[in-house]
Image: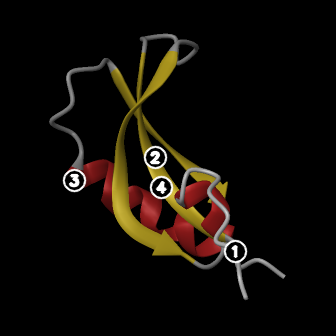
Amino acid sequence: MDQVFYLLAIMGCSDDNLDCRQARIEPARYTSRASCQEAMADALLRNMDLDFPVIAGQCQRHTPEMADGGKVNPRG
């Protein structure tokens, strides 16, 4: 079974919080969505320098294959 991890994306959003785009990714990997969400408040404070009306966070689920760009390493 693949090991799942979560990355915390920092999103820059419009005033109405409807038009958002990824501005940064925090360097840490989290083992659960809950631990990612717990880290969100501090991460948002660290990223208040972004030039957007609203800054938000989003925990994104990843697998090792996603992190490698979909490349599969053959075994054998």
Residue picked out by circle 3: 46
Task: State left or right for residue 25 relative to residue 34.
Answer: left
* Dot 1 alpha-carbon crowd within 10 angstroms: few under 14, some 14 to 19, many 20 or more: few
**Which kind of residue does numbered mark 4 sit on?**
Leu
- Of badges 4 and 3, nearer the viewer stands 4
Marked residue nearer the N-terminal end (2 or 3): 2
What kind of element bears circle 4?
Answer: strand
Residue picked out by circle 2: 9
Marked residue nearer the N-terminal end (1 or 3): 3
Q: How far apart are marks 4 and 1 (CA)?
A: 30 Å
**Which kind of residue does numbered mark 1 sit on?**
Pro
Eyeballing the image, is 57 above or below 7?
Answer: above
Labelled pair 4, 2 in contact (Cβ < 8 Å): yes
Q: Which residue lies furthest to the front in this view?
A: 76
Marked residue nearer the N-terminal end (4 or 1): 4
Q: Nearer the viewer, residue 48 or 4?
A: 4
Residue in view at x 51 percent, y 11 percent: 16
- The colour scheme applied to this rendered structure is secondary structure
Marked residue nearer the N-terminal end (4 or 3): 4
Eyeballing the image, is 31 above or below 69?
Answer: below
What kind of element bears circle 1?
Answer: loop
